[in-house]
Image (tube, helix red, strand yellow):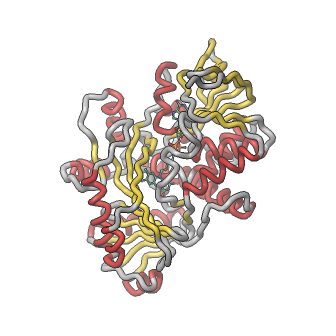
Amino acid sequence: MRKTEVNLSADVVVVGGGIIGLCIAYYLHREGGNVVVVDRGAMGEGCSFANAGLVAPSHFIPLASPGIVAKGLRWMLHPESPFYIRPRLDWNLISWLWKFRRSAAHSMVQRHKKPLKEFLEFSRVLFRDLCRADLFDFEWSERGLLMLYLTGAGERDLRGLYRQARELGVSAQFLTREQLARLLGPIRTPAPGGLFFPEDAHLDPGAFVKGMARYLSGRGVRFIEYAAVQKLIHRKNRVEALQLENGRVRARQVVLAAGSWTPQLTAPMDLDVPVQPAKGYSLTFPWEKPVFTVPMILTETKIAVTPFQRRLRFAGTLELAGLQLKINHRRIRAIRKGVQKYLPELEPFSRQKGQLWAGLRPCTPDGLPIVGRVPAYPNLIIATGHAMIGISLATGTGKVVADMVLERSPEICIHPFRVDRF
Ligand SMILES: Cc1cc2nc3c(=O)[nH]c(=O)nc-3n(C[C@H](O)[C@H](O)[C@H](O)COP(=O)(O)OP(=O)(O)OC[C@H]3O[C@@H](n4cnc5c(N)ncnc54)[C@H](O)[C@@H]3O)c2cc1C
């Protein structure tokens, strides 16, 4: 069937209707902007849909951090480990890994953690405001985040994180076995202790993106769905329009928030946007009578366990395997087994099929998102590379990009996230 021809003009067009694109559209619309959002699929069905849903100021250490390279190499030899790189001769991947290794230096992490912490906290405050505004329900819950460890190495990692949290002024408590038991209530764990971040929160990411899309479309924001942007049409240093399979969208300003697919659109323009897709999985189970309400991260396995109001979700693994969503069942088994080790009473869930989902996290080599104007094309803004903290940073990114579009100064320092830093 032939698609209807599209021929539109707008002040701002956002490419990508994931949580980042939708939050940008929300803050622009709130300021009276005329916004169009284009997605190659339906709104909110990329990586933003069934992830762990943590809004986590505790995640102020970027993915590229000391020790991660050695750990990653060890993990790669283990088929059930949380990390995997599909070996291949891909120049973009090789260059990304090289930059990643360079960024994992102590000095870089020292430089990056403070701006990242500020961005995370800014975003969390905005989520709370959104919840109070009561525009749609997204199961917002302020119960903190508990990180459990089983081994000496896990304890050392968490003690290091605890020290850094204290230095940066992030609230954190190191818990003994007895304190853990009090926090977890009826659910037991063999973990000898854990690290608790009381200021972290969580939400249902699927409910958030779908609710936000409904809210915006009900208020006149125009969505073009199932329409992949094929290229950005530019003349001299201005992007003039987006080329779709079935037409064009012209705009004064263009925001690229296409997650892991962003480099497909920037590469033909000779822009270096080093984003690699990192696949992760989740398993979701119906849960009629929740017995705990605090989400957890199982430190050694990097699995997240998120309690929603009537569902329970396990999420994890990071596979650098290219732009594809093929499911590796060995790793899914590893997620099921991993949860049992820390929370044996959840074993019945591991025997249920559950709803299986995969998403591609857009990862930069230095672990920081890319949020800023492109110097070579001043009417083009890029907002991507949020990796494992795209939910946590979504409202902050939305607000900062809206300010940029409206030529106002953002409320936080965004210099570390600029496009031309690589
Ligand atoms: C297992 C797992 C658990 C996670 N847990 C958490 C968590 O607990 N907390 C947290 O903060 N983050 C978490 N994340 C990370 C988070 O999900 C991502 O960082 C975030 O969803 C990225 O959002 P996005 O809008 O950039 O990308 P996406 O949601 O992928 O959106 C990009 C959109 O662009 C569209 N698009 C792409 N190309 C084109 C094109 N050419 N034309 C038109 N549209 C296009 C896509 O269809 C897609 O809808 C997790 C990720 C995974 C995989």
Which residue appears farthest toward the top when viewing the image?
236
Q: Is residue 415 visible?
A: yes
| Residue found 37% across the figure and 38% down from its top | 324
Q: Position of residue 122 (x, y in %)?
A: 64, 55
Comparing 398 with 244, the one in front is: 244
Comparing 189 with 139, the one in front is: 139
Which residue appears farthest toward the front when viewing the image?
1
Does 69 sit above or below residue 245? below
Q: Is residue 266 left or right of residue 95?
A: right
Q: Position of residue 158 (x, y in %)?
A: 38, 67
Count of picture labels: 0
Q: Position of residue 89 (x, y in %)?
A: 25, 28
Q: Is residue 422 left or right of residue 412?
A: left
Q: Is residue 153 left or right of residue 180?
A: left
Q: Is residue 163 visible?
A: no
Does 421 sit above or below residue 349? above
Q: Quadrant of residue 174?
A: bottom left
Which residue appears farthest toward the right when viewing the image?
32
Does 86 sit above or below residue 56? above
| Residue found 45% across the figure and 51% down from its top | 388
Q: Position of residue 154 (x, y in %)?
A: 31, 67
| Residue found 50% across the figure and 44% down from its top | 46
Q: Quadrant of residue 141?
A: bottom right
Q: Quadrant of residue 147?
A: bottom left
| Residue found 69% across the figure and 28% down from its top | 253
Comparing 38 with 278, the one in front is: 38
Which residue appears farthest toward the left when viewing the image?
77
Comparing 81 with 208, the one in front is: 208
Q: Quadrant of the N terminus?
A: top right
